[in-house]
Image: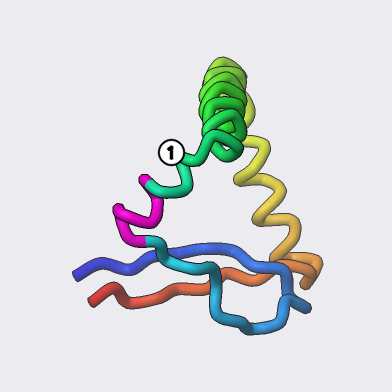
Amino acid sequence: MHTDIFYEYANEEKHESGVVLTEKEKKTLIDSKHNLGDWLLYQHFNQSFWQKVNSESEFFEEVRREKIEGCQLGWMRRVEIEAK
């Protein structure tokens, strides 16, 4: 068992997140000729985004500092959830 930690904006409302798709539903969406282009664009830009993020040596340190400052100023809060 481990604890997951995430940060949320202090004024964020609680809500259920997203829809979980089955593998069959994902395949159906990707196989659609209209959605295939969107999927390929998403994959390309997602990959290039993370390459750029990982090439910035100070990026994750800056995010850490922002989280600390946000918690200190009260506009973010740290939330811990025990994983099952």
* Residue 41 in sight from this viewpoint: yes
Residue 71 drawn above or below residue 82: above
Q: Residue furthest front?
A: 33
Q: Give the range drawn in magenta.
A: 22-27
83 displayed left or right of 58: left
Q: Is mark 1 on a helix, strand or loop?
A: helix
Quadrant location of residue 49? top right
Quadrant location of residue 63? top right
Q: Does the magenta stretch include residue 25?
A: yes
Residue that numbered label 1 is attached to: 31
* Residue 57 in sight from this viewpoint: no
Counting from the top left corner in percent of width and height, residue 23 is at 30, 53
Residue 73 drawn above or below residue 81: above
Counting from the top left corner in percent of width and height, residue 24 is at 31, 54
- Front residue of this view, candidates 19 and 80: 19
Task: Inspect the image, locate mark 1, and give the three-letter code of the amino acid beneath it.
Answer: Asp
- Which residue is at a point 45% across and 64% down the rendered structure image? 5
Residue 59 drawn above or below residue 25: above
- Front residue of this view, candidates 34 and 16: 34
Counting from the top left corner in percent of width and height, residue 81 is at 40, 76
48 displayed left or right of 29: right
- Which residue is at a point 63% across and 30% down the rendered structure image? 59
- Front residue of this view, candidates 3 and 13: 13
Counting from the top left corner in percent of width and height, residue 15 is at 61, 82
Q: Does the magenta stretch include residue 3?
A: no
Is the C terminus in the top left, top right, bottom left or bottom right quadrant? bottom left
Residue 83 drawn above or below residue 43: below
- Which residue is at a point 61% across and 25% down the rendered structure image? 45
- Which residue is at a point 72% across and 69% down the rendered structure image? 9
